[in-house]
Image (spheres, rainbow, N blue to C red):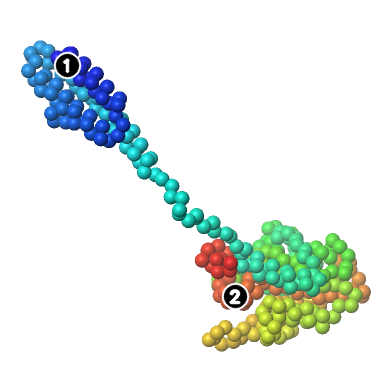
Amino acid sequence: MKEKIDQVREDFLKDSSSVNNSDDLEKIRIKYFSRNGLYANLFEEFKSLPKEEKPKFGKLLNEEKKSAQSKFDELKKSIESQASKNTEYIDLTLPGKDRELGTLHVLTQTLNEIKSIFKGLGFSVYTGPEIESDENNFEMLNFPDDHPARDMQDTYFINDSFLLRTHTSPVQVRLMKNSKPPYRAIMPGRVYRNEAISAKSYCLFHQVEGLVIDTDVTFAELKGTLVYFAKQLFGEDVKYRFRSSFFPFTEPSAEVDIWWQPKGKEGKWLEILGCGMVDPNVLNNLNIDSEKYIGYAFGMGIERMAMLKYGIDDIRLFFDNDNRFLNQFK
Ligand code: DAH
């Protein structure tokens, strides 16, 4: 019995060392592990052994078969993984994958357009920080501590003296603090207001500020500049009006409206910006001779401009970063 077991083991090792594919494997399975296979034969013979030899050979046979079986399983695995590798091939005729190009955010596009219009009029671009002092955001702009105009803006205060700027007007203050007149600059940037979020208002948005100061600036120049701007952005035949208004830092002050007529809807006047002649108090606060210098300022919301230009009806869309929205402005 012992010799027979040794012989089967030897044969099995020899056969399995020359397996190349699943056909060879199947032959081995039939030869050794099928119902009439060599291992089944050994167990058959085992039955006729004398009683006292059974324990010894029973154990040996079981171990032999188990080890052969596990060797076989390993072989099977390696043949299968070989086969799956062989079916992976590269089809060189397939078209390449499209690389999706990003696009400038619609707000950036709108700002770029606004910038280029004002650059054409000789304006330079100046910027300031989003965390501002109360002094620059309010005090210097002629908002005294208890001035009711402070209520117009719901401010995110950081502490008693610092806040997230509520408008870009403090950049005017920085420009005037840091250099001497004349000035002709626009100042774009992000601003913050603690407002209830809705389709119309968001806790942050973007503005473009403008400041022109020289010795001979007139309200007529202010009008001419802003009308030119509106025509460039909204088209030559845009209908507009100047409406008198109030800001602490300008006197007189005005707001500009344009006539808005979406297809199939009733038209209405919509405010696009605030403006005015710089209040002499602001110049005095900043040690600029208000007898010698005079100027105008204006401020507009970039979201507002984009919403009107592209017919966008919800300000939150600008901040969702939803590709279905963004991709419409490629
Ligand atoms: N700062 C104003 C606001 O946020 C906008 C504004 C109005 C700016 C008139 C100006 C201006 O420079 O002259 O509502």
How far apart in space, not on screen, are marks 2 and 1 (Cα)?
A: 90 Å
Marks counted in the figure total 2
Residue 187 picture quarter: bottom right
Q: Does any portion of residue 246 appear in the rendered image?
A: no
**Residue 311 percent location from the top left of the image:** 58, 77
Q: Name the residue under label 1.
A: 4
Residue at 7% x, 18% y: name it. 48
Give the side of residue 111 with respect to residue 261, left or right.
right
Q: Which of marks 2 and 1 is in front?
A: 1
Callout 2 secondary element: helix
**Residue 147 percent location from the top left of the image:** 74, 72
Q: Which amino acid does label 1 sit on?
A: Lys
Give the side of residue 179 with respect to residue 34, left or right.
right
144 or 305: which is nearer to us?
A: 305
**Residue 279 percent location from the top left of the image:** 82, 75
Give the side of residue 165 with respect to residue 215, left or right.
left
Q: Name the residue under label 2.
A: 310
Residue 84 picture quarter: top left
Q: Earlier in the sequence, mark 2 or mark 1?
A: 1
Residue at 63% x, 71% y: name it. 303
Q: In this view, does 149 lie above or below 136?
A: below
323 or 278: which is nearer to us?
A: 323
Q: Are marks 2 and 1 in contact (CB under 8 Å)?
A: no
Q: Quadrant of the C terminus?
A: bottom right
Q: Residue furthest top?
A: 52
